[in-house]
Amino acid sequence: MNGVTRPSARASRVHGQVHVIGAGLLGASIGLGLRQRGVDVTVEDVSPTTALLAVDYGAGRLRTAEDATPALVVVATPPDVTADVIERALAAFPGAVVTDVASVKLAPFEALTRRGVDLTNYVGSHPMAGRERGGAIMARADLFAARPWIVCRDEETPANALALVEAVALELGAMPLEMTPEEHDQAVGLVSHLPQVVASLLAGRLLPAGERAVGLAGQGLRDTTRIAGSDPELWVQILGANRAPVVAELEALQTDLAAFTAALSDPDAPGARRRIADLLAAGARGVARIPGKHGTSERFATITVLIDDRPGQLGALLTELGDLGINMEDLRLEHSPGAQIGFAEIAVLPEVAERAVADLGERGWRTL
Amino acid sequence: MNGVTRPSARASRVHGQVHVIGAGLLGASIGLGLRQRGVDVTVEDVSPTTALLAVDYGAGRLRTAEDATPALVVVATPPDVTADVIERALAAFPGAVVTDVASVKLAPFEALTRRGVDLTNYVGSHPMAGRERGGAIMARADLFAARPWIVCRDEETPANALALVEAVALELGAMPLEMTPEEHDQAVGLVSHLPQVVASLLAGRLLPAGERAVGLAGQGLRDTTRIAGSDPELWVQILGANRAPVVAELEALQTDLAAFTAALSDPDAPGARRRIADLLAAGARGVARIPGKHGTSERFATITVLIDDRPGQLGALLTELGDLGINMEDLRLEHSPGAQIGFAEIAVLPEVAERAVADLGERGWRTL
């Protein structure tokens, strides 16, 4: 694709073989990304079809009897079997470091501790990345680019085990971030699990509505409910495994919702209008805290280029970017039909943004 | 811009002068769109600066003493002064049809009826369009393209008044839809006002959270809270003017939220897991009811073109589209760096989609 180059061919930070158990979206994306970095990746899945699909997709190869113990095993299975698979992996591959990528961290750790499993070689982790649809077919090598990858260590974690898991995260472009399992579960309870429940309950209110009412839906409703389309079964597992933090968040939300509803029901009660305004203003301040809140571009810097409303201008700009060696990661158009000018919003890696603006300016393009 | 042409120069459906009161996002967008269709538009605003900004932006001209009574007055003011401005417009321009674009329809109608205002020439309306940020500077001539534009008539509404308001909606590319004020307010209470409150309360939960937790935010949280960034003052007005339907929706949501929280708190209670799964599944079915739920492309048909990962391929495709006379309304790239192929998702008007696929196919491009 124009302006998009292959990753560099430098040596990988990940030494030794990586074995991925569970070839869904996350497992296959990890395999795909690591293989492109030159790492030897093997994959397995309870479904032989899924495993072969992941192999075809380029996410790795199947293990053979000749394969030695991998340096790292990545458990990328659904949350309700994660603890079991970690336990089996530690037994099957003694000496290998074992990590998992499940979206809850305390429950599997506690389950394994209860069973008395030796967790010296286990390092729990969680890449904060995903897509609405799962499966190997949706895998992307850049799924983890610029996303946080939480790594849970404790005092007994060997330095080399921690280093290996963080190397995988770095190799895939993610940002390793150390947290305790408790801190992790509280944080994702707020920023991931609470929004999921809220979106589902909000979208559920559309079921009894009439066709004409639903037909008025705009972008606001679409955005607030998009993630409600995720797999309910997966979410029953995730929420069940992170019950206490999610319930605490839901109860806090219930309190706010009750206060808001009471104030709106009787706006002439003392302070009611003020409470409504305060809760709405708190929302505006809350959303402003979210880093990089402008859509998918948070991984990249955005350059806005003004384009005259003449045929061929956008094509010329893209050709120019190619000539300048500027890799374009995403492109969006913004224009009002009939207006004299439009805007092309071009996403580039943050480190090339400044040069890109300067080079484009030299060639006569106006940027914002 | 490549592939985007001017609107056709055919005669407008709107005969006579249109006067817009309130030059914010909606008023200025209406003026901009109608002027591009050759309609004589005048604008006024309580802020002279805003009025002049709208004039500079091309949304219309200021009224002069020589101007005759306009055929149509569009009231595009904040909701809490809408009834007052409608009343003044009916008095100031006898014989003119007066419409408003406020996002609630029953409250202004009832307020005017209580005051004994003759509403023969008034037709309430509501274009379902907006942007996060308001103001004339954000105006777009295509803001209303393919969006529903609700028109509220009653038995006394003269046919010519109704026809004039619907002509404006059609001229701006919107879809006129007749509803009673009650039906309208119930519908927007569900699809617009409820999501707004939910997004605000959800985003408000981020305020007490730690920096590290908020730093884990992903696209799900961003999408579910985006509209919480809207102007709280405007929303206090809107929600206050549509109290009964919004309170009913909030109470229904409270019931679901309480049921969900109770079930998650005690998942071993009889039927608890089933209730969790049912509420999540209801959300998935609810979101599936939303028409055109794939982001901004709902106005357009999307063609997905496969592109080889070679420099210049995207530029070549865009040039080809220009040659074929296919107007591209939006473009998104989807690719995994290092993968052999990428996808360009091209938004076009629905009526040209089929021909575009055929023409591109003939020239050797693969489409999905």
Image (cartoon, coloured by chain):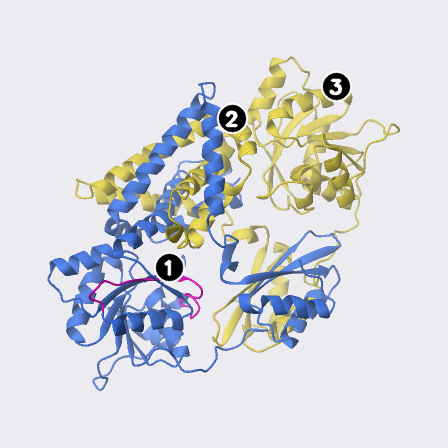
Chain colours: A yellow, B blue
Element marked by disc 1: loop
> Which residue sits furthest right?
A66
User: Residue B218: x percent and y percent?
Assistant: 53, 43
Q: Seen in the image, is A60 located left or right of residue A270?
A: right
Element marked by disc 3: helix
> Which residue sits furthest bottom?
B66
Instruction: Label the magenta part by its dominant secondary structure.
Output: loop
Disc 3 or 2, which lies upstream in sequence? 3
Of badges 3 and 1, nearer the viewer stands: 1
Q: What residue is at 29 percent from the left and 41 percent from the top?
A: B248
| Label 1 and label 2 in one chain | no
> Label 3 is placed on what type of residue?
Ala
How far apart are labels 1 and 2 at the CA level? 39 Å
Question: Which of the two residues, A245 or B52, is positioned nearer the viewer here?
Answer: A245
> Is any atom of residue B73 visible in this view?
no
How packed mark 1 is, by other alpha carbons closer than 10 Å (few <14, some 14-19, many 20 or more), is many
User: Residue B305: x percent and y percent?
Assistant: 67, 61
Q: Which chain does the numbered disc 3 sit on? A: A
